[in-house]
Amino acid sequence: MNQPVHRDLTLSEIASMVASFQEVVCRLLYQFRSEGIIEIDRASITIQNAEALENLINAG
């Protein structure tokens, strides 16, 4: 079972770290959720499909 990672950063802070906008980060997180890659809630993110996430990273 995948363990959730507690999210201490706001979406705005995450966006700032990757030189993007909060709306873009939010849209991508929800897209990843709809594809079954992650599960998200207000306090945590859980990777559900590590292989799919790795493929996205490598496709870069």
Image: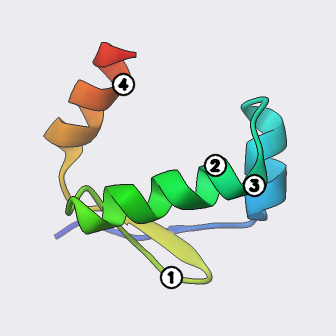
Q: Determine which quarter of the picture holds residue 2.
A: bottom left
Q: What amino acid is labelled 2 in the image?
A: Val
Looking at the rendered structure, the kind of residue marked 4 is Ile
Q: Nearer the viewer, mark 1 or mark 3?
A: 3
**Does residue 9 appear in this view?**
no
Q: Tag 3 or tag 1, which sits nearer the N-term?
A: 3
In the displayed orientation, state which residue is furthest to the bottom. Answer: 42
In the picture of the structure, the residue carrying the numbered disc 1 is: 41
Circle 2 SS class: helix
Tag 4's secondary structure? helix
Q: Residue at x 27, y 67 (%)?
A: 34
Q: How far apart are labels 4 and 2 at the CA level?
A: 17 Å
Comes first in the chain, label 4 or label 3: 3
Crowding near pointer 1: few (<14 within 10 Å), some, many (20+)? few
Q: Residues within 10 Å of mark 3 (few under 14, many from 20)?
A: some
Q: Which residue is mark 4?
A: 57
Residue indicated by mark 2: 24
- Residue 50 in picture, x, y percent from top left: 22, 44
Task: Give the alpha-carbon distance from disc 1 to disc 4, as whole Å.
Answer: 22 Å
Q: Disc 4 versus disc 3: distance between alpha carbons?
A: 20 Å
Q: Tag 1, which secondary structure? A: loop
Q: Which residue is mark 3?
A: 22
Q: Nearer the viewer, mark 2 or mark 1?
A: 2
Residue 27 x/y as whole percent: 53, 58
* Residue 43 picture quarter: bottom right
Q: CA distance from mark 2 to mark 3?
A: 5 Å
Mark 4 touches mark 3? (CB < 8 Å):
no
- Up the image or down, 24 lies above or below 30; here it is above
